[in-house]
Image: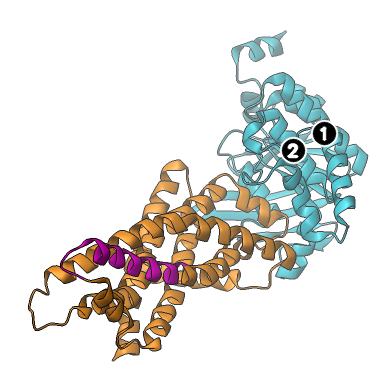
């Protein structure tokens, strides 16, 4: 479980996050939704420690990450896997080398064991025979799957996904969502997914937090979101005319 | 002015992060060898062409300005050697490498920053500065001195070719000049300068690349800035070291 308590974050004189507190549950997909510029990505980066907080704390299973020294943070970071919006695969490395990277860096396994684990992770995300291709030679969906394979290589306890299906067609997006859902259950991870894609919300939304202007505005699940009366959330969910029509039925 | 101090401070903080113990020595060693090939061997062709032609031109210009019959013929070879060992090979080649290697480093690291590859490293718990910059520094410190010695040799060869094909000069005079009053300290001086330049050629572009924000346009700007600042710093260090070591 990840507990975010009273986080505040500003850049220069602009406050981005206002007193945000959320509990992200283990074994579930925790969605952070909101419009562009609402502060979702900043919140995620604050949780991972890429941005320092102005105030508040982040706890990973009771371990205070915010006030930890470099060594302690490093230990927790080895338990984190992250899938980036643009996949963030290392261009100069092949698919195999990308997935191998965290294993070579931190595990004491032999070359054969590492290769076995790489092939297992790639197979888990339904990718085979792509080991020697470079990221530029893969489609967007395949890049995301390699990103997931790299993220789970070290058996992480926590998985962060930043807009996992942006730039993908709806069908491939659903494939990626389902993969994240399966992996979360399989490894009993605490998964946080940042998205503004409603397909994703409906497919995977166990525990949803709606961020609006840097504040946690609403919390619930995918069934509750359809019945909500929250004005700002309704404007976000039912942004298109078709969705508004659908709601009025 | 305040911004200059801000950048200098940030540069030294980045260096502090860079020189922390690497996360994995095996990977760092592999990286150093890769960088030596990428940054060093990849520059050999360009340096060869420039050195031979510059050596030839320096020899020709010296010859053209020494038409006094009282001046011995070997002075042409001597002047070529001295100018190449003391300035052309260490300083001019470093300026050229600042353009070639510097822009390469700044754009490579800058692209990694804007495509979140550096964030990916940080999230994995990897010290991104040490992982990305340290191998480049070590590779440059090991390989750029070799490039500079190679340039000294090829510059002298360029002069030799001029002596071979020009009527006003003899090969004997040129070779005598190359060997005349040779001091090993000149090479030591050139190597000391080269080590400083090699450090600057890798760290300043790394700094600009590492703190790139935005997109493709900013990567280009970082690359340009890194070449400009590296060149300026090389010239300043060159002046200071010359003052310190030769006078």
Q: Residue furthest bottom?
A: B247
The chain ID associated with circle 2 is A
Q: Secondary structure at mark 2?
A: helix
The x and y percentages for residue B173 are 24, 77
- The residue identified by callout 2 is A146
Q: Quadrant of residue B52?
A: bottom left
A136 shown above or below A13: above
Depth check, front residue: A87 or A204: A87
The answer to whether residue B176 of the structure is visible from this angle is yes
Q: Are marks 2 and 1 on the same chain?
A: yes
What separation in Å lies between label 2 and label 1 (alpha carbons)? 8 Å
> Which chain is cyan in the picture?
A
Most common SS among magenta residues? helix
The answer to whether residue A12 of the structure is visible from this angle is no
B62 shown above or below A92: below
The residue range painted magenta reads B147-169
* Left or right of residue A185, residue B186 in this image: left
Residue at 19 percent of width and 70 percent of height: B169
Q: Is residue B150 magenta?
A: yes
Q: Is residue B154 magenta?
A: yes
Residue at 70 percent of width and 11 percent of height: A246
Q: Colour of chain B?
A: orange
- The residue identified by callout 1 is A125
The crowding category of the residue bearing disc 2, from other C-alpha atoms within 10 Å (few below 14, some 14 to 19, many at least 20), is many
The x and y percentages for residue A125 are 82, 34
Q: Secondary structure at mark 1?
A: loop
Q: Quadrant of residue B80?
A: bottom left
């Amino acid at each position: 479980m990840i507990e975010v308590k009273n986080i505040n974050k500003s850049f220069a004189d602009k406050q981005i996050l206002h007193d945000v507190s959320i509990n992200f549950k283990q074994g579930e997909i925790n969605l952070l939704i909101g419009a562009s510029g609402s502060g979702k990505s900043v919140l995620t980066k604050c949780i991972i420690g890429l941005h320092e907080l102005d105030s508040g704390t982040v706890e990973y299973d009771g371990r205070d990450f915010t006030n930890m020294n470099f060594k302690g943070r490093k230990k927790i970071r080895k338990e984190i896997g992250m899938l980036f919006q643009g996949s963030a695969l290392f261009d100069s490395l092949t698919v195999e080398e990308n997935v191998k990277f965290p294993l070579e860096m931190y595990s004491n396994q032999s070359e054969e064991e590492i290769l076995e684990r790489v092939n297992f992770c790639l197979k888990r995300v339904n990718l085979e025979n792509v080991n020697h291709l470079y990221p530029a030679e893969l489609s967007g969906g395949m890049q995301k799957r390699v990103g997931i394979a790299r993220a789970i290589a070290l058996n992480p306890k926590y998985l962060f996904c930043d807009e996992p299906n942006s730039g993908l067609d709806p069908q491939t997006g659903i494939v990626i969502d389902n993969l994240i859902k399966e992996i979360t259950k399989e490894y009993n991870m605490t998964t946080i997914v940042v998205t503004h894609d409603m397909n994703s919300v409906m497919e995977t939304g166990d525990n949803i937090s709606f961020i609006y202007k840097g504040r946690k505005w609403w919390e619930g699940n995918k069934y509750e979101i359809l019945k909500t009366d929250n004005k700002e959330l309704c404007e976000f969910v039912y942004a298109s005319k078709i969705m508004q029509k659908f709601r009025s039925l | 002015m305040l911004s200059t101090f801000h950048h200098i401070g940030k540069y030294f903080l980045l260096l502090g992060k860079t020189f922390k113990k690497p996360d994995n020595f095996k990977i760092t060693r592999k990286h150093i060898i890769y960088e030596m090939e990428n940054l060093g061997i990849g520059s050999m062709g360009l340096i060869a062409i420039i050195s031979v032609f510059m050596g030839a031109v320096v020899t020709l210009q010296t010859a053209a300005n020494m038409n006094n019959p009282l001046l011995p013929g070997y002075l042409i070879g001597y002047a070529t050697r001295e100018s190449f060992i003391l300035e052309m090979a260490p300083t001019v080649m470093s300026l050229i490498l600042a353009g070639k290697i510097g822009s390469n480093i700044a754009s490579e690291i800058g692209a990694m920053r804007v495509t979140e590859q550096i964030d990916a490293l940080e999230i994995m718990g990897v010290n991104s500065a040490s992982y990305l910059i340290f191998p480049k520094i070590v590779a440059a410190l090991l390989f750029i001195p070799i490039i500079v010695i190679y340039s000294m040799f090829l510059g002298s060869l360029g002069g030799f070719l001029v002596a071979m094909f020009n009527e006003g000069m003899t090969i004997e005079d040129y070779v005598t000049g190359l060997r005349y009053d040779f001091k090993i300290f000149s090479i030591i001086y050139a190597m000391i300068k080269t080590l400083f330049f090699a450090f600057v050629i890798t760290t300043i572009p790394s700094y600009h690349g590492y703190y790139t924000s935005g997109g493709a346009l900013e990567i280009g700007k970082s690359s340009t800035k890194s070449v400009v600042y590296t060149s300026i710093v090389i010239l300043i260090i060159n002046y200071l070291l010359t003052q310190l070591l030769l006078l």
